[in-house]
Every structure is written in C-alpha cells, then in structure tokens.
Amino acid sequence: MKIYIEENYEKVSKRAALIMASQVVLKPDSVLGLATGSTPIGMYEELIAMYKRGEIDFSNVTTFNLDEYYKLPIENENSYYSFMMNTLFNHINVKKENIHLPNGMTESVEEECKNYEEKIKKAGGIDMQLLGIGGNAHIGFNEPADKLSVDTNIVDLTQKTIKDNSRFFDNEEDVPKKAISMGIGSIMKAKKIILLASGEGKAEAIRDMTNGYINTQVPASILQAHPDFTLIIDKDAAKLIK
C-alpha cells in the first residue's frame, strides 16, 4: 500500500487527477473504474481542466461505474448516471457507448449483475479503479457484514449510508434502500486501485482500513491485500493513523 497524505482536499484532488491522467496518457484505451459521491468531484474537475487544455484525450477510454441506485430512474438528478454525466462525462470527449453503469431499473437483477461482470471481462478488465470510502468503511456499496459478495450484486443499504446520502436528497425517506454494486472481488480484480478520502469524518474508517487486519465489518480493509493500491488522503482523514 502506498499512502499520500496531502495538506487539504484540493491537493488530494490534484494528486489523484495526476495519477489518473498518467494512466490515460500511458494507455489511451484504458478501462477506468469510476466512483460517485462528493469526494471525487475535485478530481473530476481537475481532469476536465486538463482535457480543456489539451493535456489528455478520453476518446478511446472505457468506463465502468461502481454502482447505481436500484429503481431510481436515470433521469432523476440523484441517480449516479445523472451525477456522472453532469460532473464529468458531458465535459470530456469520452464516447457514450464506452460509458457503463449498472442498470438500476432492470427487471432482472441477477441477469444485470451477471451481464455487468461479463462487460468488464470483455473490455479486458479494469486498469485503474477509483474508490471513495464511507464513514463505515464501505467501498462501492459493499457494506459491513459477516460475509462480503464477490461479484456485482444487489445490496441493502445500511441506515448509516442512507443517512449519509440523504444530503443529496430532499429528505431521508427519498433515499433508495437498495443499490446494484460491484462486489469486493470485482473491485480487487482491478490492476490498480486508488482511494480518496478527506475530512475528519473519514478518519476512523481510514484508521480501521489500514490497521493491518482484514475484517468483513471493515470492507475497505481488504484493499491492504491488493498488489497496487494507493491511498490519497488529507491530514484530517489521516489524523488517527498510527
């Protein structure tokens, strides 16, 4: 595990953008695993700026997002499809046919999960996977549990995650209770993984994921076993690391 501790969120975002941009420059047809939430927004803004300056070309890039809410139409402003289009994809030259997110409106969850795994495999696997981390150390929507799913699957969101995500909705009751998410195994198959975290609210999760023990109640702790994992955090998120 490689750890970068930056001064603030802005520098976390710049560091992450440079790493992601280097991946695309060195391999223009990279397959990128992307994440939603507030943490990667700064990185996406940096990548957009690089694209507008002519420093990076996304025309041959393929993307796969970690997750999508179940039974939330993509037209809804809080769907992860809308988030990605508004935050990144509408501002760069990635081809629409190369953009992939789980279909949360599917009538057959089992078939959708299987097909999503097959699409990733057909694309050659994920070259670089971007992650955030929940306050309870979930990655994707892989919540703390006695057992963790290997492949893409449908998950029940914990009350903490629902509460945390309610800031994006009018009220907590509007937050979907389920999501389709890449599993832990899906994430760990990525050739490279970078995880971003910022703020004191993530300090306990970062401490627990880096303490040298793998625990299904701390899903992110499995990342310690990945051969090419980079953690990029600010001082506030790093304050409990020994």
Image: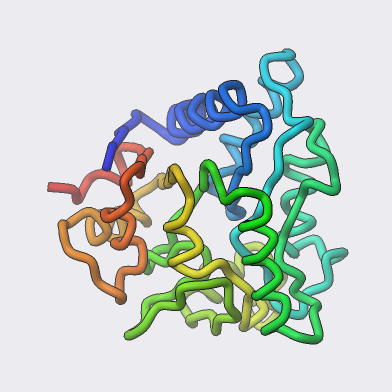
Total count of labels: 0
Of 84 and 129, nearer the camera is: 129
In percent of the image, x 56 and y 44: which residue is there? Answer: 40
In the image, residue 78 lies at what x, y percent? 74, 63
Q: Quadrant of residue 198?
A: top left
Q: Is residue 202 above or below residue 9?
A: below
In the image, residue 142 lies at what x, y percent? 47, 72
Q: By what rule are the colours in the image chosen?
A: rainbow
In percent of the image, x 80 and y 77: which residue is there? Answer: 105
Q: Is residue 19 above or below residue 183?
A: above
Q: Quadrant of residue 213?
A: bottom left
In the image, residue 20 lies at what x, y percent? 54, 32
Relative to 199, is 94 on the left or the right?
right
Q: Quadrant of residue 79?
A: bottom right
In percent of the image, x 68 and y 21: which residue is there? Answer: 56
Relative to 226, is 44 on the left or the right?
right
In the image, residue 180 lies at what x, y percent? 63, 74
In percent of the image, x 37 and y 77: which residue is there? Answer: 144
